[in-house]
Amino acid sequence: MKTIMLLLDGLGDRPHPALDGKTPLEAAHTPHLDALCQLAETGMMIPWRQGVPLGTEAAHFVMLGYDMKDFPDRGVLHALTMGDSLEEDTIYLVTTWAWVEAREDCYEILERNVAALSAEESDILASKLPEKVNGYTFTWQRGQLPHGVLKIKKTGINGNISDSDPFYPHRPVMAVVPFETTDPGAEATSQALNQYLAFMYQALNEHPVNQKRRTHHQQPATMLLTKWCGMKPSIPSFEIQNGLKGLMLAQSTLMEGIAALFNMPCESYHSMGEAIERALSASADYVHVHTKKPDEAAHTKNPHEKVRVLEEIDVQLENLVKAAREKRHLLIVTGDHTTPSSGEMIHAGDAVPIMFCGPSLRPDHVNLFGERSCATGSLRLTGSDLMPMILNYTERAIFYNFRPGGIRRPYIQTNIPLLKP
């Protein structure tokens, strides 16, 4: 039996006065999602831990069957989206071109994401960055501007370091320090990166590119803010981890990086209707259909925009409802996290609605797909429960006490060594 996951990024939300106290999902006209709900076992899912906001990458890591302690962080994923072959003794950080100004006791951030910086300008500025600091080798790669990836390489490097990007508004550049470690190697890495950033500002603040941008009333790019440091992980592929041949259907570069991390094929699509058709016809055991649109709409802090996007998606789900009624596949609809379309939070740690449709399931009484309606459903789970439930519902889950082969897997294995006469 094939599993199709429709992952509506940032699906969860909070009640909004502009929607008469409803969430965008509750306010949206979604007859197809509601029809699925009437065939489904429903409930609420905590992506990882109650009250802990997650990004898409961390939530997917857990939901796709991996332990958060092995999460390599987003710097690695961004490197993978650029087609980078991850190297040993190398750390990867996400960077963002920012406009900062040196003050008496800090670097004040005037703009975290420099607008309209061209690739040519970015490359010229990057050419002035140092390649060596304290024995560390620095290499910067341009991504989707104003972002990029900074690689720092040295034998035995310790990447347990903090971010320089404060992430939240109205805060200055942070000093890089060892993160949850007292290892001298992390201190050395932190010092080298701090020197690199300071040198960068000195080299770029009065650079002709930035002088010209100021003349044209454009924001100068005077520093690369760094965050989400990670190193090459040692994790099994999605197929080895879960016993399922996977396929990712997505439209974002981040999802390409997530798929690459798990050695899972990733294909783009033009419309949700097309994605559903391809998912239904795919030969994979597990098809992950991802759309970023609800999350992007919520980040506008306009709840009506999120309502519009959800309704736009729902119109294209007719064939998914037909498949659910045929009960040939396990169909799942949920989100990876809550993205509030009100308030100051970027993401929130609230539970998200989830529903499962398929043979042998036990549909409950819930008829509308929404946060509060699904909260009355029969299921309560975390993101870590999701893959075991998929294996269970598709009759692939292994009896826990059974010990075939040399390593525990959650699924019935077929490639175990045999005793020979």
Image (cartoon, rainbow, N blue to C red):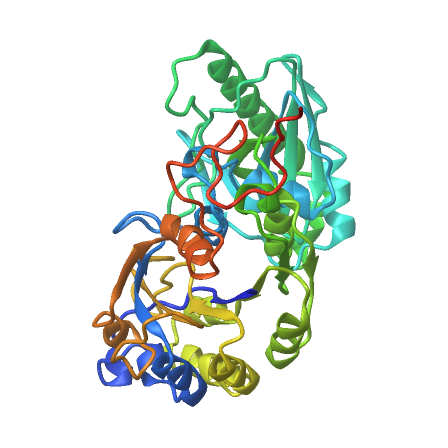
Observer-nearest of 138 and 397: 397
Q: Is residue 169 visible?
A: no
Image quarter of residue 298: bottom left
The extreme top residue here reads: 184
Observer-nearest of 385 and 61: 385
Q: Is residue 81 above or below residue 216?
A: above
Position of the C terminus, as image quadrant, is top right
Position of the N terminus, as image quadrant, is bottom right
Q: Is residue 396 above or below residue 222?
A: below
Q: Is residue 75 above or below residue 347?
A: above
Q: 406 left or right of 214? A: left
Observer-nearest of 359 and 388: 359
Image quarter of residue 178: top left
Return the x and y of residue 102 as percentages of the image width and height. 49, 35
Observer-nearest of 81 and 36: 36
Q: 127 left or right of 31? A: right
The extreme front residue here reads: 421
Residue for point 25% across, 71% down: 377
Residue for point 38% across, 14% down: 182
Q: Is residue 209 above or below residue 89?
A: below
Image quarter of residue 381: bottom left
Total marks shown come to 0
Return the x and y of residue 173 as percentages of the image width and height. 45, 37
Residue for point 68% across, 64% down: 283
Return the x and y of residue 286 as percentages of the image width and height. 57, 60
Return the x and y of residue 67 as percentages of the image width and height. 43, 38
Q: Is residue 245 visible?
A: yes
